[in-house]
Image (cartoon, rainbow, N blue to C red):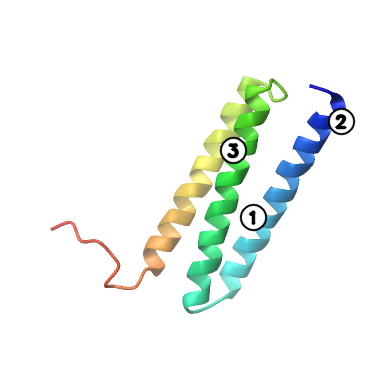
Amino acid sequence: MPKRDRYALGLKIEQQALDFFELIMMGRAKTGPGKILILKKADLKLQMIQLFVRLAKDIKVLPVKRYIELEEKLLELGKMIGGWLKFLAPPDDKRTSD
């Protein structure tokens, strides 16, 4: 893969990560139903980051060892957002274990 394309992929991942953190900060500050919408956007942004990181690994721009480290951190972030969204879900939307 040409250096220019590798650089462009790196920039794309970086921009997605910055957008993700911006959404998280907005989610912290927001209240009400808008908070859930922002966090869902952050979750989607995180999925896009995971996709681009996986692509970087697949085209051998990112070493496998570094990919594994990043993927673990991205999965942990996903769990955190999922928990946050579950906590914020209205009582009628929460599933019971009955």
- Side (left or right) of 72 relative to 10: left
Residue 3: where, in percent of width, then height? 86, 26
Q: Which residue is mark 3?
A: 51
Query: What amino acid is at disc 3?
Result: Leu
Report how far apart the C-alphas of labels 2 and 3 lie in the structure.
20 Å
Query: What amino acid is at disc 1?
Result: Phe
Q: Are marks 2 and 3 in contact (CB under 8 Å)?
A: no
Q: How many marks?
A: 3
Mark before the other along the chain sequence, 3 or 1: 1
Q: Which residue is mark 1?
A: 20
- Side (left or right) of 13 relative to 38: right
- Side (left or right) of 61 relative to 95: right
Query: What amino acid is at disc 2?
Result: Arg
Q: Is residue 96 above or below residue 74?
A: below
Mark before the other along the chain sequence, 2 or 1: 2
- Side (left or right) of 45 relative to 16: left
Report how far apart the C-alphas of labels 2 and 1 lie in the structure.
24 Å
Residue 75: where, in percent of width, then height? 50, 41
* The C terminus sits in image quarter: bottom left
Q: Are marks 2 and 1 in contact (CB under 8 Å)?
A: no
